[in-house]
Amino acid sequence: MKPVVGATPRVVKSEQEWRAELNPTEFAVLREGATEPAWTGEYVDTKTTGVYECRACGAELFRSDAKFESHCGWPSFFTPLAGESVVLREDRGFGMVRTEVLCASCHSHLGHVFEGEGYATPTDQRYCINSVSIKLVPDES
């Protein structure tokens, strides 16, 4: 994975350490920037109230109240939990220019963010996130 310019992760591990902690699919997505197939992730249709954490390091990333139905095949959020929870970088893979979303804490690949698609959300942004990149911690209430 390419480094994020000007940003230093708080959680730093070797490739060997990440491989020992993550299963092969998690490693491919989180550490190598792969994408899980559309409509296959466990959180695509989830309505449970809680916080979504980074599956690699446990950092809090998104709240369920920012999740919305985008019908794109991946969980979608209109904003991260806090401005510092994610970092963005340009992704020129697959012959297009996109904005990649990374966990600010460990720089694991989460997905991409898109703007101006016309969704009726407060930010007009769609954080399109791989289910395998996140873990839902349900509220206890």
Image: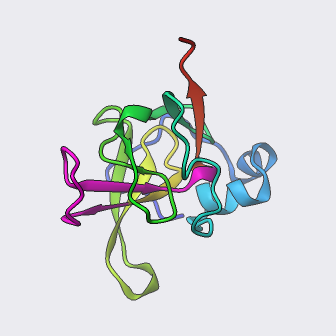
What are the residue bounds of the magenta stretch? 113-132
| Horizontal and vertical percent position of residue 81 | 36, 33
Asked whether 27 or 113 is in front, the reply is 113
Q: Residue at x 51, y 64 (%)?
A: 73
Q: Residue furthest bottom?
A: 95
Asked whether 1 or 33 is in front, the reply is 33
Res 36 → quadrant: bottom right
Q: Residue at x 23, y 48 (%)?
A: 121
Q: Is residue 102 left or right of residue 132?
A: left
Q: Residue at x 51, y 38 (%)?
A: 47
Res 95 → quadrant: bottom left
Asked if residue 103 lies in the magenta stretch, the reply is no
| Horizontal and vertical percent position of residue 105 | 47, 37
Asked whether 31 or 111 is in front, the reply is 111
Locate the N terminus and report the quarter of the image it occupies.
bottom right
Asked whether residue 31 appears in the rendered view, the answer is: no
Asked whether residue 47 appears in the rendered view, the answer is: yes
